Amino acid sequence: MTVTTAAVTDDEADIRLDRWLRRHFPDITQGVIQKLCRTGQIRVDGKRVEAATRLTPGQMLRIPPLPQAVPGRPEAKPVVPLDPALVREAERMVIYQDDQVIVLDKPAGLPTQGGPGISRHVDMMLPALQGDYEHRPRLVHRLDRDTSGVLVVARTPGVAAKLAAAFRSRSVQKLYWAVVVGRPVPTEGRIELELVKVDGFRGERTAVAGPYDKDTAHAITDFATIDHAARKLAWLELHPLTGRTHQLRVSCAAIGAPILGDKPYGRERTGHEGGGHTALVDGLGEQLHLHARQLRFPHPHGGTLTVEAELPAHMAATFRTLGFTAPAAAPPSR
């Protein structure tokens, strides 16, 4: 084997060097990549680089002879065809698609990815949407299991890297709708909190940090009240400017208006005394009332793509009960 060169394509913009190498040479290990970078055997445009270096289109990679197989490594598992019911479910979620991105309307209760005890999730359904394209679609961001709404998927690894960079740079505008218990005062404003991960009764949770907590994360959310039912419930529009775990749920609870149905972050209906509100209301659904209504993000081929998702059935039923009138989702626009 000899030293070769390869050019970074437009589709591979912003991908990390180590991920580029693993994509093109599946048998190479991270340890080998780091060693080859450290010794200067892998170079980008003739320069030494680190494994985490992000690539740009047109850059030339120097690639030394690489291992084609690793003794003892288990063979890849055979591809198992998806259940036709899962294929139909994945196809029903699609609200926009082109040769770069797919946008889904994720239902409440469906996890975005797998984990302990999770056997059915969005990520496992994505091969159903590959079609004749070379790559399996890839997740770009996440929604909580119980949050419904707009979820963006990339058709290629390069597009996934571009969109992930857009999310990191805050050039993606997110709009959520929530029904909360209580009416915030003031009715609009900005919530800024320091958040911290804590161990809860049902696993790790996010909480408002105390004065002596370390490893905190700053969270910023703009909110506005669109409508309300007396002072008991309100329909909020939420714009998270940061992307912390459970940020919206903690933020609403912190201003005394927990999201309807949010048992982990709103107090239970019984067994608590004092001021504030519980997360459950008799006569209304007990599912989480949080919906990713709209995403506006830079399209990889230029321009800005805006996509909206209709309210899920349980939130639509609550809107009817409370007399809230929500406009229909606008068609995707770019």
Image (cartoon, rainbow, N blue to C red):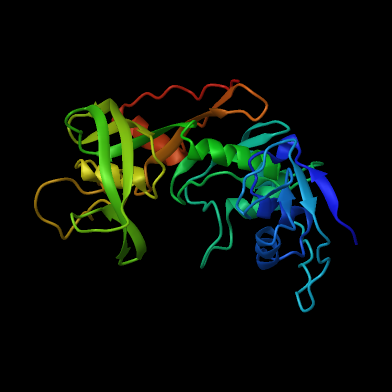
Q: Nearer the viewer, residue 165 or 179?
A: 165
Q: Quadrant of residue 64?
A: bottom right
- Identify the image quadrant of residue 129: top right
Q: Could you tell whether 94 is left or right of 70 in the image?
A: left
Classify 259 as above or below 300.
Answer: below
In the displayed structure, does residue 140 sit left or right of residue 231? right
Residue at the image point whose x is 49% and y is 40% from the top: 168
**x, y (%) of residue 333?**
59, 20
Residue at left offset 70%, top offset 66%: 32
Q: Foreground: 54 or 207? A: 54
Q: Residue furthest right?
A: 1
x, y percent for residue 169: 48, 36
Q: How many marks?
A: 0
Between 145 and 317, the one nearer to me in the picture? 145
Q: Position of residue 85 (x, y in %)?
A: 68, 51
Residue found farthest to the left: 274
Locate residue 12: give its quadrant: top right
Q: Where the C terminus falls, by quadrant?
A: top right
